[in-house]
Image (tube, rainbow, N blue to C red):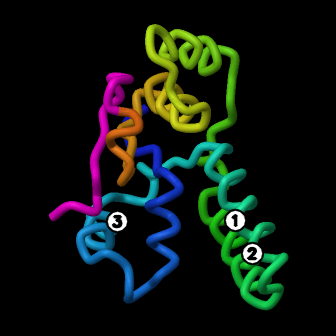
Amino acid sequence: MNGYLVDTNVLSELRKGSRANPSMSAWLEEVKDETLFLSVLTIGELRFGVENLRIRDPKQSAALDKWLDNLQERFSGCILDLTKPIAERWGRLRVPQPIAVIDGLIAATALEHSLTLATRNVQHVLRTGVKFVNPFLP
């Protein structure tokens, strides 16, 4: 599989519309939609953000809820589940130095599916050997 595993920070930036990072917006326009994939963990991170906001701002969380539903519809069929091979790879990536759980699982997902990770958080996954692109840089 060739393409990109899109990290949460890229999707969050996308939501900003015209205020989004210009380099990131330009990168997204250059890549074909059919080459973009999400991890189920990214859906979980976004859901956490919606629910956390719901406590403080129910109106804004309702708007984010709708955005998240639309995002899941847009990427229907391109949301990658965690699998045993991904878990095995993640376990190996954590030795000799532990890596944050979600960052490690996302890197393992990209590696397992031969995808390039599109993320701003390059430092979080640098030592995993995953191919990456930082679409926020010109």
Judge depth for marks 1 and 3 and give the one in front: 1
Cβ atoms at labels 1 and 2 below 8 Å apart: yes
Q: Residues within 10 Å of mark 2 (few under 14, many from 20)?
A: some
Write down the region rendered in magenta: 126-138
Q: Is residue 57 left or right of residue 21?
A: right
The quadrant of the image that shows the C terminus is bottom left
Q: How far is the residue under mark 1 from the one under mark 2? A: 6 Å
Q: Which residue is mark 1?
A: 49
Residue in view at x 45 percent, y 71 percent = 13
The quadrant of the image that shows the N terminus is top left
Is residue 63 positioned above or below 125 on the image? below
Q: How far is the residue under mark 2 from the one under mark 3? A: 27 Å
| Residue 137, numbered label | none
Name the secondary structure under disc 2.
helix
Residue in view at x 66 percent, y 44 percent = 41
| Residue 53, numbered label | 2
Q: Amino acid under label 1?
A: Gly
Q: Which residue is mark 3?
A: 28
